[in-house]
Structures are given as C-alpha cells and as structure tokens.
C-alpha cells in the first residue's frame, strides 16, 4: 500500500507514459461507445475529481472529512446563481467564480475544523455541511428549496463562447463536447494534484498524517498545513460540483446532504485511499455500480450496499491497493 | 560561550517534582550526559527545554534569548533539536523521505507545492549523505516502519541531526536495543556529533557509554541536579555511586562491571 505512494523519482517517466496511455484511451472511447456511456464516463470523471480532492485530506493528511458534500454542493449552487442571477453564459466564468466561492467556504469551514482531529474533525465537517444543506433547503426563494435550480446546458457556452449549444441536435453535441471539456479539466486537475502530493508540501502532509508530534519537532506548523490542505481539497471537490451541474441540468439540496459526503468517502475507500490513483478508480467504479444498481432494481440501495460491503471485505486495501499488493507479490515470486 | 542556560527551572506533576529548581548551563561545543535513576526527571528536563512541556516556573535562555514561552517550532528554528526515547518517525515514509523532510523544513522549502520533492538535487544529496553517516544508506527506500529497532533509533537521531541544530538533545538513543548494538549506535552518533562540533546533551542509562563519550556528566536525582563534573570526578563521587549503583567506594563503578 505504502509502495504506491513511495514509488516516484525514477518511475516518473513510467508514470507519464502510463497516464498518457490512459488519456488516449479515454479520448478514443466516445468514438466507439454509445452516447449514454459517454454521459456515464463524464459523471465518473467528475466524481473522480471530487474524490481526488477529498483524498488529499484522508489519504495524505490523515483527516477524514465527512462533509465534502458542502464543497461539491457549493460549487454546484454557485454555478446556478451565476447563470440565473448574473445571467452569465460562459462556463469558464462559472468555473472561476465557483472555485473562488468554494475556496472562501472551505477556508472558513477549514479554519474551524482543523483545530480538531479524528472523530471531532469528522463530526465538525459533517455539522458544517449540514448548515449549508439546511440553508439550501429552507431558503427556497433563493435556492428553490427541494425543487432546486435548473441550469440548462443550452444556456452555457464553452471556451469563452467558441462552442455553444443552440439549434437542433444540440444535446448530442453537448454530450460530446462536454466530455472532452471535462476530460481536459480532469487531466489538468490530476496533474496538479499529483505534483502537490509529491511536492515537499505533500510530503509534509504525509509527515503530519504519520506523526503530528514529530512533524512539529522538525519545524512544520501542523495546523496551518492542515488548513491549506483543507482549502485545496475543498477547491478540487468544488470544481467537481461546478462541472456536474450542466450535465445534470439541475442542482438540488441532495448534493449538500450528508449521504453524498458518505458516497465521496466510499469512492476513496473502494479505490484505495492509500494510493494516488485509488480515489479515481474508486469514483469511476462507484459511479457504474450505482448507475446499474438503480437501473436493475427498485431496491437499489440494498443491492448497492451489499455489493459494496462485499467489495470492501474482499479488497481491504481498495481496488488499486489490492492490485499493487498482488503485483508486488508476483514481482517477488518471479525474482 | 554559553549556549543554553536554565534558571530555577521547575515542572511539577502533582506531588512529583519532575524538574526541581534546575540551573543547567551548556557551553558551545560540549558533549554532556544527563544521568540518573528512573524517574529522576531527565526526560522531563529534555521535554521542558524542547517545549514539549511548559515549565511551571523558571527561565530558559538560549543564545542569550529568553525562550521560556516560545513554541516548539520557534525553538526548532532557533536551533534546538531533539530525538525521542520512544522512536517518533514518519512510519509510512521511506528512511530517505524522513530525513529529506527535515532538510526541506529547515531550509524553508517545505511550503513549496509546485515542485517534485525528489527533483531537488541539493536536498537529495544532503539526505543521502546523512543516511550514509548514520549507516542507513542501504535502507534508503524502506518505509521507516519496516526498519529494525536499532535502525529506527538511528533514524530518529538522524532526523534531529539533519536540522543542523546548535543544540542536539538525545533522549536515550540506545534504549531498547541489544548491548551489542548499543556500542555501534553510540559510535555512530558520537562520530557524527563530534565530527561536526555540534553541542549535544544525551540522556543515558548506560554508565560505560556515559564515561566513554561525555566531556561533562550531569547527575539528576528526584528532579534536581545532584552533581556534575568531568567523567573522572563523577566516577569518584560517592553520593553519585550510591544513587546510581546503591554502593559506594573508590572503585564502585568498575566493581559493578
């Protein structure tokens, strides 16, 4: 498990080549699969960005946030406000505005939460996310209450107005264009997060995770670093929320509610929170599992629950963690 | 020149006088040992000086500056580093990353999130040199949790040393390892510390080790300094022999062996 985090340096070219390969496959996929699968993939990539942000706190800093729905939801609602109340059409404007807003919320919430660790931290993040949920729920004249706010894709433009979705067959065009838009942002986000995780700052977070006392005794301001990690984490998850809205066409209080925070936690654990790629794989896998569970039965929560329990019991290190363990074992036996 | 001075330092835990009116002076370049029976207050003294514990009263003056109320980080920045009796490492990081982290923190590069840690040549070279000095070069890429106890003790000291402190406190660097390993560990520590002329204070139980390496020995008993002096003076001090060995006489320490 630890190996996947430690293995860098010489393997940097290997990582680059592997990532490029995955990117090429992801870029080709919409050409060969039907549009529905493209939509599913887009959702998966968006959730992957959310989980990637979340895992900077869990996997790298050792803080389990149970309130990341707050940042996802904040991003989503901010896009709704920007398009509805400011009448903006540019997706880039939504992204910048949404990320700034999410940063402010994460900075305030984080400032409060990083004063604590472990269960107290988790409960605080949960409580604060529920504050946002109740605001979205009760202030219906602003937020639309349970009806939420519609964000029609047709009202948006991509790349500063270069791509718009007016006229016939626009939904097909939107799905296609938006997939590549999300894929590009996913690639950028993943690269940035990878650099952060492997930077001196990222090492400091891991040091804090492993031994808070010793981190202080080498001169690291533990609380400040946790706070910065919290903000970065919030922005990434916020970006996911921002990208999610046009695809969903609607934002409702559900995405601010705590079960959604639970889903983000679950994606990371399912994929393996001790590896960089774990949350990405976990988010994609969870997205498919949930979609097909919903499609196959009315009791999809039960089915999904059972499948997830079995998966976690069978793969305690997560999908990526277990795969790495198996690869290491094979490598050793062939030597 | 005086590097560290404590003035009437006190730390009580209820009725226990862990540190009781301690006036300790450490001069630049000294290698001192703090000895005493279990519960004498050696570790408490180290904790108070390193800001791990706040003193009840008294003063800590480091490089002429009153640092009694400064934080751990301020003291680390000022040049006080310490190792721990119960090994305190970043267990999931490699031995290399453990040391590199201390160097990044010392140089103020730790804030950088836009560069890869492994690509910093200066830090890489220095961290590898430190690992080599401590005989840990072959364990470079092992996670700290996978190292043997003796190696973990050395890595703990290496972390503190990598901060290039002016004053290095070592809390029982050889506790919990076999007698055979003890000498090896102390030889490594002594050669590194002496070689660089670092001022060091070492808390130790093993009197052989203490007599062999220190310029000066400070004997603590019930939180207070009972005696201090050169190894020879302490060897012939009857009070000290009584406290440490339970018997006295001109050759008490050698008889014990």
Image: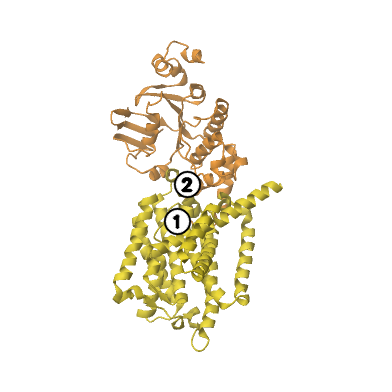
Chain colours: A yellow, B orange
Where disc 2 sits, the SS reads helix
Residue at the image position 32 percent from the left and 63 percent from the top: A131
Same chain shared by disc 1 and disc 2: yes
- Measured as percent of width and height from the top left, residue A79 is found at 40, 74
Looking at the image, is B242 positioned above or below residue B127? above
Left or right, B39 with respect to A176, comes to left
Q: Which of these two is toward me, A272 or A302?
A: A302
Q: Which of these two is toward me, B106 or A217?
A: A217
- The residues tagged by marks 1 and 2 sit, at their Cα atoms, a distance apart of 13 Å
User: Toward which corner of the image does residue B192 lie, by quadrant?
Assistant: top right
Could you tell me which chain the residue with mark 1 belongs to? A
Give residue A293's mark.
none
Q: Farthest residue in the front direction?
A: A298
Residue at the image position 49 percent from the left and 84 percent from the top: A165
Q: Which residue is mark 2?
A: A210
- Measured as percent of width and height from the top left, residue A257 is found at 37, 65
Q: Which residue is mark 1?
A: A57
Looking at the image, is A316 positioned above or below residue B191? below
Q: Residues within 10 Å of mark 1 (few under 14, many from 20)?
A: many
Residue at the image position 44 percent from the left and 77 percent from the top: A249
Q: Farthest residue in the bottom direction?
A: A167
């Amino acid at each position: 498990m630890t190996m996947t985090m430690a293995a860098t340096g010489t393997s940097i070219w290997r990582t680059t080549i592997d990532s490029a390969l995955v990117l090429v496959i992801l870029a080709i996929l919409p050409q060969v699969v039907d549009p529905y699968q493209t939509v599913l993939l887009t959702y998966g990539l968006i959730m992957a960005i959310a989980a990637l942000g979340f895992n900077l706190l869990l996997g790298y800093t050792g803080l389990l946030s149970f309130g990341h729905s707050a940042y996802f939801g904040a991003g989503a609602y901010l896009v709704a406000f920007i398009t509805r109340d400011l009448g903006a059409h540019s997706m880039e404007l939504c992204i910048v505005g949404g990320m700034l807003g999410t940063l402010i919320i994460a900075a305030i919430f984080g400032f409060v939460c990083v004063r604590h660790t472990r269960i107290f931290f988790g409960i605080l993040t949960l409580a604060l996310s529920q504050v946002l949920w109740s605001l979205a729920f009760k202030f219906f004249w602003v937020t639309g209450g349970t009806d939420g706010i519609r964000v029609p894709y047709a009202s948006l433009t991509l790349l500063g107005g270069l791509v718009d979705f007016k006229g016939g067959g626009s939904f097909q065009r939107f799905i296609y264009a938006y997939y590549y838009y999300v894929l590009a942002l996913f690639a950028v986000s993943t690269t940035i997060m990878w650099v952060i995780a492997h930077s001196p700052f990222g090492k400091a977070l891991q040091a804090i995770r492993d031994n808070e006392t010793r981190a202080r005794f080498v001169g690291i301001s533990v609380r400040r670093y946790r706070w910065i990690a919290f903000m970065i984490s919030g922005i990434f998850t916020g970006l996911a929320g921002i990208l999610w809205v046009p695809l969903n066409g609607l934002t409702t209080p559900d995405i601010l509610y705590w079960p959604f925070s639970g889903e983000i936690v679950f994606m990371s654990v399912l994929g393996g929170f001790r590896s960089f790629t774990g949350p990405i794989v976990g988010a994609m896998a969870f997205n498919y599992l949930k979609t097909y569970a919903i499609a196959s039965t009315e009791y999809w929560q039960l089915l999904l629950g059972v499948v997830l329990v079995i998966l976690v019991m069978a793969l305690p290190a997560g999908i990526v963690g277990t795969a790495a363990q198996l690869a290491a074992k094979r490598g050793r036996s062939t030597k | 020149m005086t590097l560290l001075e404590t003035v009437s330092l006190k730390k009580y835990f209820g009725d226990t006088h862990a540190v009781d009116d301690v006036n300790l002076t450490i001069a630049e370049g000294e290698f001192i040992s703090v000895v005493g029976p279990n519960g004498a207050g050696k570790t408490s003294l180290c904790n108070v000086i390193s800001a791990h514990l706040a003193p009840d009263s008294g003063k800590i003056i480091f490089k002429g500056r009153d640092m009694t109320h400064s934080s751990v980080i301020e003291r680390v920045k000022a040049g006080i580093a310490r190792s721990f009796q119960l090994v305190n490492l970043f267990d999931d990081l490699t031995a290399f990353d453990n040391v590199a982290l201390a160097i990044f923190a010392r140089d103020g590069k730790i804030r950088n999130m836009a560069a890869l840690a492994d690509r910093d040549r200066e830090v890489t070279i220095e961290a590898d040199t430190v690992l080599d000095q401590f005989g840990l070069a072959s364990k470079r890429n092992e996670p700290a949790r996978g190292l043997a106890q003796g190696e973990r003790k050395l890595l703990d000291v290496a972390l503190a040393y990598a901060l290039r402190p002016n004053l290095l406190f070592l809390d029982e660097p050889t506790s919990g390892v076999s007698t055979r390993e003890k000498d090896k560990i102390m030889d490594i520590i002594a050669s590194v510390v002496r070689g660089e002329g670092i001022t060091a204070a070492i808390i130790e139980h093993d009197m052989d080790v203490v007599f062999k390496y220190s310029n000066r020995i400070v004997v603590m008993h019930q939180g207070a300094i009972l005696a201090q002096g050169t190894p020879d003076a302490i060897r012939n001090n009857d009070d000290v022999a009584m406290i440490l060995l339970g018997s006295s006489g001109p050759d008490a320490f050698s008889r014990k062996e």
